Amino acid sequence: MLLLVSFIILFLFLYQKKRLSQELKMQKVEAEYKDELIVATVDIQESERKRIALDLHDNIGSLLSVIRLKMYQLNKNTSNPALQESYRETTDMLDDMLETTRTFSRELMSPTLEDFGLAHALENLCTRIHADGIMHTSIQIVGTYRRQPLKTELNIFRIAQELLNNILKHANATEIKLLLVCSDRLELQIEDNGKGFIKNEKTPTSGLGLKSIETRLHLLKASLEYIPNLKKGTKVVIRVPLQE
């Protein structure tokens, strides 16, 4: 009986151990599949962004330029003041459409990022926001930035882009400050002087933009921390481990 009981206990122990091992393997497979799915989803998104950006630049942008040229040729053949005024108004609208198309194209696909890296792309993004007169935007870089794999830089840039868009839309801010700290890891701080978060309010986690941020943080194995300033504004800190 003692041998039988010992055998049963040993059998149950080995069975539980094997079952636990199989569960751990399944969890690992599921986690790997989830990561592969996330990577594929982000790659598809970036591929679509690039395609749309090229279509905007090459097709719609070129078409608007041709229409503007045709308008100029038609205007040369008329001396009617009313038609000339209409021409000026129309060309002004076409110029606005061309600039908007170029802006959308740059936001969808950043050539500065691919050519010069994340630090220059963030500087260029801040310069554009500031130059557009939307609000005062500045960036400070501490340390020496070294280039990372393009996908890493792209994910960080998209996170920063989404956070800046959220500030522009919702914060009622007049100033944005970026601080990029380069050391054994990368730390990006984005601070605004807007309305901030109400005390004890949970940070929102819904919406396509915020879901995109969560996805890219997961891929980067990075962390994001919201630091509300109870007087005014909010600071967001993103910490990204760097590859050797």
Image (cartoon, rainbow, N blue to C red):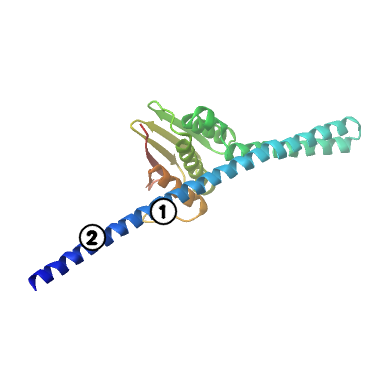
Residue 141, disc? none
Marks counted in the figure total: 2
Judged left or right of residue 229, residue 70 is: right
Judged left or right of residue 141, residue 130 is: right
Label 2 environment density (alpha carbons within 10 Å; few <14, some 14–19, many ≥20):
few
Say which residue label 2 marks. Answer: 17
Say which residue label 1 marks. Answer: 203
Q: Nearer the viewer, mark 2 or mark 1?
A: 2
Are the residues tagged 2 and 1 within 8 Å (C-beta)? no
**Residue with the most extreme left position:** 2
Image location (x, y in percent) of residue 229:
38, 45
Residue at the image point whose x is 42% and y is 29% from the top = 141
Label 1: state its secondary structure.
loop
Residue at the image point whose x is 51% and y is 27% from the top = 116
Please state, as top left, top right, bottom left or bottom right, where the N terminus lies in the image.
Answer: bottom left
**Residue with the most extreme top position:** 144
Residue at the image point whose x is 87% and y is 38% from the top = 83
